[in-house]
Image (tube, grey):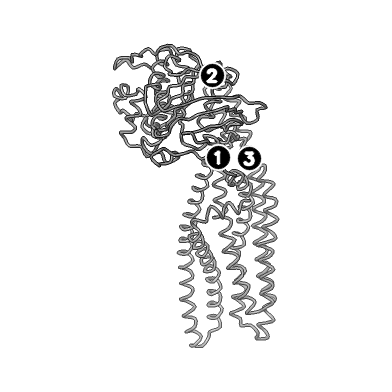
Amino acid sequence: MTMPLVMRMVRPWRWRWMLSAALGALALGSSVALMATAGWLIATASTHPPVLTLLVAVVAVVAVRTFGFGRGVLRYAERLVSHDVALRVIGAIRSALITSLTALVQRGGAVGRRSGLLSLVVTDSDEVGDILLRGLLPLISASVVGTAAVLVAWSLLPAIGIALLLCLLLGCVLVPVLTAQRTVAIERDGVAGRLERDQLLTETLDQINDLVAIGALPSALDRLAANERRQVRVRLVAARLAGVGVAAGILTTGSTVVLTAVLGAPAVATSRLGPAWLAVLVLMPLALTEMVGAVHDAATALARSDAAGRRLSSLLAPGPQDAGSAVPGPRTGTQCGTQVASKVCTQVGTIRLRGVSARWPGADQDTLTGIDLDLPPGGRVVVTGESGSGKSTLAAVLVGLLSPTAGRITVDGRPVGSLAGSGLASWADQRAHLFDTSIRENVRLARPEATPSDVDRACADAGLGGWLRELPAGLDTAVGEHGLAVSGGQRQRIAVARAFLSDRPLVVADEISAHLDEATAEAVTAAAMRPDDARCVLLISHRPEDARHGSQVLRMSGGRLREVSAPPVEPFTPPRSGAAVR
């Protein structure tokens, strides 16, 4: 499963990859040819040859210089090209991995722990890149150069050609295969240890403030240290195994040198082989020692990367597409989706849910049952209800994180299977993540190609205008790690601005006022529910007073919706400049 993944990913750069393989074979061949030519030159000169032979020796001197210079230049060029291809492939794998994980979430699948995802995106992707650099490339070079060396030896003396072939089969096939089999077992323990380490590290960093407060940080660090000691033991076993493999390769080539001398001596005595050519044949196995070691390392790298490749292949394998999930584009003819242009998706008409039911993965029964809901352009819909009634499940269906188990969804009267991947809805929730960068960049996450005026408009619509004008750096103000440099209210406003910037026809605001004081909660809710004829906002809230912001008020109970009367909307008076609600 690993090799098809690598071949699929390297296909766009296959010509560069073939060039790197050719350069690698030429570099290795230059190394072997350098020692063989130098050996022939020294052996020939030692016999005090006539002038004509010396003229041939001059050619050999030039060849030695050429091979010596070419070995370094070709190796450098090979590293440049091969690393360029490998880095491109790693980037493509990570991009495809993010896309697959997004699709998996939209289908309601489980993606595992964050630490496991981190290992997939970083460690496993790098190890699959190693298949190209440390696995396939040395094997291709060794196959070409090894075959050429055997043919040359066979042409000079068949017995030595057979001996060299046996040497390469032993050092480049048998020993690496046996080592790789043992490496797989060791790597299995190593992977389990790394996953445990990543999980411990993630939990410790996430809870470090609480651990310090209760005095449990030393215990957490002890667990990390114990895991590291186990990892060190695994690495030591792997290092010993690698050492045994390298030693076996050196022993094999050394034995072949002796065997070549023994087989070649009678041929020289009977004039079937010149003394200088015997020197070439004797030195050839020594020149191949580097190649044998590289093949051993390649087999180890392939064995180590195979598990990572299988994990990635299981996520990157193309799955069946939902033929009913195509969402009609806006009337302008531009398709809503990943390429969202400014004020484009607002052309979509009413989104209707009829008899929709849904459940979370692993649940025995539906959390939502028979939901009927109309979301027209410009609508302001408020959904209230107790915790666990199904409000967040409804939000997950609307933003495409869950597909319905029953019922029908239509957009502009056209049925769709689900809203997964449609690009019709944006989500602002109480746990919106802010990255340690500027306010501008956090808002632009929704639409990286947005212009400065688009960002300004989204921030103004979210009620951030007055606060931003008071900041010395304005939109370029850093929000700090996890947004800790700004207040909770402004953090939620930034999340709302991000949702507005997406310019999608539906904004799902899920408990955006949770954990905020009354005044701040009212300000954030009023900003999110500001009238807009093109955009529909569905507000999910546990605050009964938020009902006055809706043109339609629904109550969720037991996974079902029922409409309730809404009190008249009272205008909210924002705080004066300089006294922004926090």
Category of crowding for the residue at label 3, using alpha-carbon neighbours closer than 10 angstroms: few (below 14), some (14–19), many (at least 20): some
Q: Label 3 is placed on what type of residue?
A: Gln
> What numbered label is drawn on residue 165?
none
- Total numbered labels placed on residues in the image: 3
179 left or right, relative to 556: right
Task: Tell me the CA gap for discs 3 and 1.
Answer: 48 Å
* Residue at (65, 48) in percent of width and height: 238
Left or right, 515 with respect to 468, comes to right
* Label 2 secondary element: helix
Between the C-alphas of marks 2 and 1, the distance is 52 Å
Which residue is found at the position 51% from the left and 88% from the top?
50
| Mark 2 surroundings: few (<14), some (14-19) or many (≥20) residues within 10 A | few
Q: Where residue 394 sits in the image (x, y, percent)?
A: 54, 25
Q: Residues within 10 Å of mark 1 (few under 14, many from 20)?
A: few
Residue behind mark 2: 213
For marks 2 and 1, give the one nearer the viewer.
Answer: 1
At label 2, the amino acid type is Ala
Judging by the rendered image, the residue that carries numbered circle 1 is 324
Label located before the other in sequence (3 or 1) = 3
Percent of width and height locating residue 250: 64, 62
Distance Cα–Cα, label 3 vs label 2:
29 Å
- What amino acid is found at the position of numbered circle 1 in the picture? Gly
The residue under label 3 is 231
In the rendered image, the vertical position of residue 370 relative to residue 11, given as above or below: above
Label 1: element kind:
helix
Verify CB contact (< 8 Å) between mark 3 and mark 1.
no
The C terminus sits in image quarter:
top left
In depth, the one of 263 and 186 nearer the eye is 186
- Give residue 234's position: percent from left, percent from top: 65, 43
